[in-house]
Image (cartoon, rainbow, N blue to C red):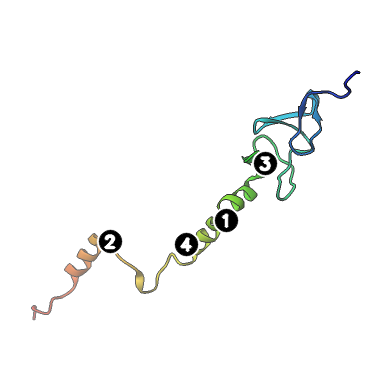
């Protein structure tokens, strides 16, 4: 009995045969050009713009959100609270220079 179908590599997204004319090789698999989309937001990706994790492909922002969800909030908080009330700690050289210029009270 003849076997029908291409028998080639299978696309991980749609589970159909990938023919050479439509093949994108990434993440140790062959993908259809139309299936090479972010798993989260469905944006179309290129070989230069994708990130992979566990045989799934993501755009750079979804990848960042998935693997490092706290990082964006941390950066926002760092910029928001980078200036502390009271001036914060000063470097030692600046503190010594400031104390040397202040009068000690012994001079009259």
Judge the density around disc 3: few (<14), some (14-19), many (≥20) Cα neighbours within 10 Å.
Answer: many
- Which quadrant, please, contains the N terminus? top right
Give the vertical position of 108 relative to 46 (above or below): below
Q: Which mark is residue 14?
A: none
Residue 69 % position (x, y): 57, 56
Earlier-in-chain disc, 3 versus 2: 3
Q: Nearer the viewer, residue 8 or 40?
A: 8
Q: Earlier in the sequence, mark 4 or mark 3?
A: 3
* N-terminal-most mark, 2 or 4: 4
Q: Residue furthest right?
A: 1
Residue that extends furthest to the front in the rendered view of this protein: 1
Q: Do residues under tags 2 and 1 come within 8 Å of each other at their CB atoms?
A: no
Q: Is residue 45 left or right of residue 73?
A: right
Marks 2, 4: nearer the viewer = 4
What's the distance in space between the residues labelled 2 and 1, CA to CA? 33 Å
- Residue 42 image position (x, y, % from top left): 75, 47
Q: Are marks 2 and 4 in contact (CB under 8 Å)?
A: no
Whole-angstrom CA distance, mark 4 to mark 3, is 30 Å
Picture quadrant where residue 9 is located: top right
Q: Which callout, 1 or 4, points at the residue further toward the start of the chain?
A: 1
Residue 45 position, x and y percent, is: 71, 40
| Circle 3/circle 2 CB separation < 8 Å | no
Q: Quadrant of residue 107?
A: bottom left
Tell me which residue sits at (24%, 61%) in the image.
Answer: 92
- Return the residue found at the far top: 1
Tag 2 residue: 91
Measure the alpha-carbon separation of dots 1 and 4.
15 Å
Q: Secondary structure at mark 1?
A: helix
Residue that label 3 marks: 57
Label 1 to label 3, Cα distance in Å?
Answer: 17 Å
Identify the residue at horizontal 40%, vertical 70% (top origin). 84
State yes or no: discs 1 and 3 in contact (Cβ < 8 Å).
Answer: no
């Amino acid at each position: 009995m003849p076997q029908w179908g291409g028998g080639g590599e299978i696309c991980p997204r749609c589970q159909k045969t990938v023919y050479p004319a439509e093949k994108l090789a990434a993440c140790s698999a062959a993908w259809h050009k139309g299936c090479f989309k972010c798993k989260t937001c469905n944006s179309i990706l290129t070989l230069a713009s994708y990130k992979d994790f566990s045989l799934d492909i993501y755009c750079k922002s979804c990848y960042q959100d998935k693997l490092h969800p706290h990082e964006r909030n941390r950066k926002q908080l760092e910029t928001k609270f980078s200036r502390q009330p009271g001036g914060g700690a000063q470097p030692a050289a600046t503190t010594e220079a400031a104390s040397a210029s202040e009068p000690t009270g012994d001079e009259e």
